[in-house]
Amino acid sequence: MEALRELFRDYRFAVGFVIFLFLVVLAFLSFASPYDPIRQLQVPRDRPPSRAHILGTNSKGQDVFWEATFAIRNSLIIALIAGLVSRIVAILVGFVAGYRGGTLDRVLMGLADGLLVIPLFLILVMVAMLLRGSMTLVNTGLLLAFFGWAWDARTIRSQILSLREREFTKTSVLSGNGTMSLVIREYLPFTTPLIFSTLINNIAWAIGMEIVLAILGLVRLEIPTLGTTLQWAITYQAMLLGHWWWISTPVVLTILLLVALYWLSVSVSEYLDPRMRIQRIGARS
Amino acid sequence: MLPVIRAEDLQAFYVLETLRGKKVVRAVNGVSLVIPENTVYGLAGESGCGKTTLLKVLLGNLEPPLRHFGGRVLYRVDGEYLDALALPEGKRQKLRWTYISYIPQGSMSVFNPVAKLRTTFMDFLESHVSGKMRQELLRHAEEHLERLGLSPKILEAYPHQLSGGMRQRVAIALATLLNPRVILADEPTTALDVVAQRAVLQLLSDIQRKLRNTIVLVTHDMGIHATVTTRMAIMYAGRIVEEGWTQDIFTTPLHPYTQYLIRSLPRIGDKRLRESAPGSPPSLAQLPPGCPFHPRCPLAFERCREEVPELEEVGEQKVACFLRRASHVVTS
Amino acid sequence: MRKGILGIAVVLLVLLGGLALAQLPGGVPREETLIVDQLTGRVGTPSNFNLWAGWRWQDRGLQQLVCEPLWTVDYATGEIIPGLAAEMPIYSEDFTKMTIKLRQGVSWSDGVPFTADDVVYTIDLHVKTPGLLYHGPMAEFVDKVYKTDDYTVVVELKKPNSRFHSHFLDRWGCLRIMPKHVFEKVEDPVAFEFNPPVGCGPYVLKDYDPAGFWTLWERRGDWEKTPTGMLYGEPKPKYVLFQAFETEEAKILAQLRHELDMAQYAPEGLRVVLEKSNTARAWRKDWPWVVNIDPCITGIMFNNMVEPYNIKDVRWALVLAINMVEYMATAFDFMAPVSPIHLPPVPAYVEAFFNPLEEWLKNFELDLGNGEKFKPYDPEIPAKLAQAAKERGYPVPEDPKAIREIFGMGWWKYAPEVAEKLLKKHGFTKGADGKWYLPNGSPWKMTIVTDTNPAHHHYRNAMAAAEQWRKFGIDATVNATEAFNSLHLMGEFEVGTMWPAAEPWGVGVDLSRTFDVWHSSLLTPIGQAVTLGPGGAARWSDPRLDELLKKMETTNPFTEVEATRLLGLEALKVVVEEMPTIPTYGYCGAVAWDEYYWTNYPGAENPYSQPYQHWPNFKYMLPFLKRVKE
Amino acid sequence: MRFFRDYLAPRLVQYVLVIFCGITAVFFIPRLTGQDPVLEIIAQIQAQGASLDPLAVRNLMETLKELYGLKGSLFEQYLTMWRRVFTLDFGPSFFQFPTPVAQLLRIYLPWTIGLFATSTVLSWALGNIIGGIAGYFSGKSWSKILDAVIMVIRPIPHYIFGVVLLILFAYVWPLFPARGLSIGRGMALNLELVLAILRGSFLPALTLVILGGVVWFQQMKLLVQNVKREDFVEYARVGGVKERRVVFRYVLKNAMLPQVTQLALALGQVFSGVLIVEMVFSYPGMGLLLYRGVTRGDYNLVMGITVLSILTIATAVLLLDLLYPLLDPRIRHR
């Protein structure tokens, strides 16, 4: 609790959190939606924002606001699955490879590099095409998770490598501390900011990737997400027909979401960085 | 005995701005000190009592969130007293390394890891010495190292290629490159093994003897103070609680806190468990009323909880404790 | 340093901006060039023009400007235009011999005269060479080919074929005549690149993009020695540029900037162009703008070999579960004409088939079991569609005739209660949740396979159908996949949105091409590719239809026109009764023309030619275009 | 020698393994898609209106299979594939039949390399330098404003950003062609050609540089904020080392090191942004070619592009790995 109170003193955290909370509330509002997200022609089409439809309606006869609540919910689900699952893999691989080194490191990093060096996007597109019929939210999330860990595993590993070079590792190892305690007590605090920032980056990447896949038509387009909402707006030429309320909704939501995440991550990583904390809290040296 | 640095009632706090107002960490809370020429001056105290911050203030390195709230720091340059905190930044930068220099805590990592040591030395030299050719400056650095008994070849090395002790000695060499009158050394031996510690301390003493300048040696290790320093001050919760000749302090420690520090030293043949003061130093953001040490002091009485004792002279020493007023008897 | 970068950027912008007036390839003058959209996208074989050996993006100008076929069909009228031929083919009584009279005075673009030798050579080569696309039919039917004089060719057939000429009748490809003097020097006619192409058409190749984005053609100096020139006069544009666009937005912006004269869009794109440009027009000058005289019909295809879609009543129940007014709103925003039969309601067909069938349609009955009957036809659908379109805010005419022209003749009633009866008759049950269950008790799940392009009619049909059937209580999902074609041909689908019936020869009264695919001899089991697509993918046949097809084979479409039409009429009835595929609405092209440089396009008010730039008949449009600024 | 054994050799082994596994994966994945390229071609011919009788179709299918190298068992096809990899002859493209894949690559590769290399290097350099400076002066108001602007730009999808640029600079203020590049067959290498290429490539490159650069900017800014607090930086600053020197030699140089590794790995991520940008601007690049190849089940083409990409990227990563010790003495002198 103290940590949270501390974090809230940073305006970036506070603002980021408020935006994020706002989006989560939006996502939850979807459960109260008076409309079916998939059905069309439920409301008059192409109407600008009004009291009845606060963000207007689209060319498919859907209420843009309520569609957006579904879109943000589904995109968050995809991104969280992708982010969390890939984080677990990345942390495990990064820590083990970085700390153990040797053959295991080489094997793991070979694997990660293999994933990275193959034009990932191409494989992603091919697999997405293969699975298109079954590209549900969970599957999309898992697919992205599968492709999203390699990069960060490498980053985390290099951080561990550099930590291993530091004096406290030698001291700690010499003083007979166990590996687990070393990893958890000494490494985790140092890598947490990195993990958090990779998580945020990964979520941003997942959301961006979902949008790319949707624009290429490689997900199930009838399930509203930020990407498919955008794709429909593009298909129906919302931009050039002047239906700004339709096309800007997913774009603005994406920007809001990623800005909020970015602020949260920057703030959290500053808080978690031990050196920074010294500066922030005072002269406890 | 002329002072090189005089601090007068220094106050410097960390001010943390948060959404719910300010939080003030009183790291240096009314410190007055006179650091004389040609000595090794010790500064002791547990972690978190403001030693490092005091050094920063003495160096004139006040960057947010650390802010100056009162008092002066006087340097004696060419017989004149200069108020270091009132000097323009440019002027202050000029005095660094020529008048006062600094070996930071954890100075193992003071070198740019991707540059050869020569580059780092040159960076410092070129910033302070004007009108000389690179070659001359390099020769100066080499000569300096030789004077300190280090091989000039290490200039061609990268920092990670040196051992910890060696790196520390190079750091000292870097700090003394321009023969400053005062060197502030913050825990220079903390991370080293005993052999390396001795080498570093030896080097510091040598430098002091050769240059006849002042080294302010900050360490929590009372053993080092006992062997190296001539005068010393004990710091607690942002204040100086005792000051005097090192020998005097070790023979007749006046402040109960000093007594704890000395008693915590291991002695040869002493099988008793080492004692230390119960508890830990108070948070500098929430100081207790009265004497900041009273919550840990076995001898505390009514007055200690209400008033803050001033630093007063008791013989050759100075102490901030009501028990040591002239009317009280020394009992230890 | 940032200033430096900014400076460089400004200089670059100014430099590039100075040359802003986009130059055309080869530096040809804009006002003499007609720039048209390449419908099938970027050319994949930019340096290869040999369209006899495979798909060569023939709509890059190759089939429109270079090739003159023997005959071309005008799909808007069904009329056959003789090109290199001088008249219609002449069949012998027993359909074993076809005589072709050739046009005189035509020359190839390299100056060599066109003669009967070219035709004989072409057919001969195809009989001999398996790698050529038309090798199959030529080898199967041609016994002998020879010339009787320089302008008469006789083809003797191995077996009777009253439609043999259709292999030379151009609609979107046919066996075009090769220049003998070019091909006879070539060792391998399949690998030959045919670059530059030599044809009897009025244009020659000037330049092309090695990456395939554009192809530039130049009018021949001796255009009067081409069939186009002889029939219609001088093609007006000196240059024609075919340009491919990767996105709709780029195409729209190009047209708004007058960098593109003729283009085809999704309806939304068309709306943008019409709204934003003062000089743009569509085929119709008023709503619904789009070309609705296209000979293709869109709709839904069942795999008649998969349960429960092998049951006629199930197929019909699914028809009656569709509310066509809502369907059209979702699918094409009311802009296309609906059709209850397997032909589009273009004017020629309204006359030949729709009007004669109307009474029959009105009286057509479905058997609901227990002696109950139901008449499913609803002639009021166009009026309902007009009403809905009006409510949507479109300027819909009041005249009933105009309404039928825009919205079609009629469609099937929205009768979910009747559909229910039809399904219950076969043991289907409806749960308390409103969901349907198959006779075996499991929930009715349906996957509709479709194309991946959301702008395509296939996709739009799939979305609209899924929407309707979900509402009806079937768990319908859409699977848009690149394997769309493969799945259909192999029969690995249950419901799809492939063309529900093949387009006839343009809108001629000869419907043999539409129904051929359903001959029982062509029925292919699942897992094996059907050879006659796309309709064949429905895997359906009917003995009554077999009978009619047999009669058609022995009817001469040129001399026995009425008999041909009546056979088609009967076949249509069989297919409607059985409903192996559901026709929904006629294909509509959303064409936009820019009248900034060129005008007198063949719009609805003056339909002197078919309106597309990608069809072979495009060459017959060019002589009628006019420069706006002389 | 130790350097070779400990640093070089493992990387070479890894290089070979990565290429092997990558190419194998790319061989198998498209074969799982259930798409039959031969059928797709036939359907295309039928849909485009050629009338083929059943016998002809059967003949055609056999011929096509032969040509496409789809004859024989999967294992035989796999062996054929490796032979093709070593000769860099991938046979004809399926959907652009009969154009050989090698020829397509020759046409498209230079465009993509030109656009991609330029924009990657530019976005990396600009993003890191500007991000580094902004990170060092993170307290200054210009840095905060820049940070805010970039934060908002970064999430914008490539497609939207590209189309907005296209609307702005090809329609509202028509500096650039909406039609894309128009380079003819026989255009000589002269100023006009260079300008045409520049004009056609400017907007796509701008999109990639901005949207790529902002990512580097944010990463670098965070890195610098950490490096800035390192002892050696603070010490140099306290010691009066000139600020310019502190920024470039101490902060940027140290923060750049991880970014070099990142660059090597970013190369593998080429296709998403490039593909969309090539689409929006009708740019004749590999991304476009690849997407069409994938959607049409064009194994040979996909194979060719992917093999080439894997080789190029793996080699680039290896080169960067080999160059890295030159930049980081901690690796060089262990």
Image (cartoon, grey):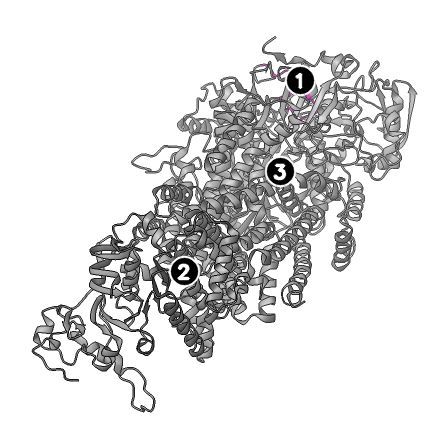
Chain letter behind tag 2: D
Task: Give whichever of discs 1 and 3 has the lower sequence position.
Answer: 3
Residue under circle 3? C500
Tell me if C543 is positioned left or right of D155 in this view: right
The x, y position of residue A167, in whole percent, is 45, 70
Vertical placement of A255 versus A189: above or below? above
Judged from the image, the secondary structure of the residue bearing numbered disc 2 is helix
Distance between the Cα atoms at labels 1 and 2?
79 Å
Q: Amino acid at mark 1?
A: Met
Q: Residues within 10 Å of mark 3 (few under 14, many from 20)?
A: many
Vertical placement of D73 versus C287: above or below? below
Dividing the picture into quadrants, the one containing residue D331 is bottom right
Q: Which residue shows up at 80% across the image and 14% down it?
A: C225
Mark seen at residue C621? 1
Q: Are marks 1 and 3 on the same chain?
A: yes
Judged from the image, the secondary structure of the residue bearing numbered disc 1 is helix
Quarter of the rendering occupied by the C terminus of chain C: top right
The x, y position of residue C275, in whole percent, is 47, 23
* Magenta segment: C606-618
Tell me if B161 is positioned left or right of B28 in this view: right
